[in-house]
Amino acid sequence: MKLTFTKGTGKFDRLDIVAADGPRPPIDCPKQGIIPHDMVHWAVESIVEAAGFLHLIADGGDGGFRTGIEDRTAQSVERLVEMFQGEGWSQTVLPDDEFIALYAVTCEDRGDTPLPITGALLTAIRARIADVTAQWSAVPVGGQLALELPGHPQ
């Protein structure tokens, strides 16, 4: 699946998705001072072995905010994305054990089952986020960044 992020001039960036069976409607990505939320999804979903929001879109979802709301695995992925987004906003990297514990509490508070997370997985995702953040920072307003998302996790 191909994801093309376009850096907008106003309050939104845009995400265009082309899945194996064709394009999906564009998604407005509110600017948040860090990379777009759906770009954090890409970084997480390109590494974890669980299907989240973007994989649901690949499977025919429409990109609406309620996509996957009943999919418990997708919700666990969403909690993980939120954790990394929080690190980006605070510009603070939590120690791995604290991150994993907070992720577990966050999932359990919402009725989700935490994904199996290791320090190595966190390191890989953080490296991917740092890399895509550098790429996105270099994109001028109106410019684009294209990313590929591997196939659906087993």
Image (spheres, rainbow, N blue to C red):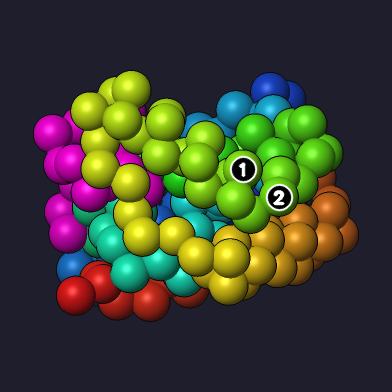
Rendering coords of residue 18 (x, y %): 35, 63
Whether residue 99 is visible: yes
Asked if the residue at tag 2 contacts the one at tag 1, i.e. Cβ–Cβ closer than 8 Å, the answer is: yes
Q: In the image, is 74 to the left or to the right of 33?
A: left
> Along the line of sight, which residue is nearer the eye, 118 or 66?
118
Rendering coords of residue 90 (x, y %): 78, 31
Whether residue 120 is situated above or below residue 53 in the rendered picture: below
Q: In the image, is 51 to the left or to the right of 102?
A: left
**Picture residue at 65% right of the left edge, 34% below the top:** 86
**Which residue is labeled 1 in the image?**
98
Rendering coords of residue 116 (x, y %): 36, 60
Whether residue 3 is visible: no
Q: Which residues are magenta?
A: 59-77
Q: In the image, is 154 to the left or to the right of 7?
A: left
Rendering coords of residue 37 (x, y %): 55, 40
Circle 2: element type: loop
> Along the line of sight, which residue is nearer the eye, 103 or 50?
103
Label 1 environment density (alpha carbons within 10 Å; few <14, some 14–19, many ≥20):
few
Q: Examine the image and state in which quarter residue 96 appears.
A: bottom right
- Amino acid at pointer 1: Glu
The N terminus appears in which quarter of the rendering?
bottom left
Spatial distance from mark 1 to mark 2, Cα to Cα?
5 Å
**Picture residue at 33% right of the left edge, 54% below the top:** 115
Q: Is residue 116 magenta?
A: no
The numbered mark at residue 76 is none
Q: In the image, is 102 to the left or to the right of 6?
A: left
> Along the line of sight, which residue is nearer the eye, 64 or 51?
51
**Picture residue at 65% right of the left edge, 67% below the top:** 123
- Amino acid at pointer 2: Pro
**Which residue is labeled 2 in the image?**
95
How many marks the image carries: the answer is 2
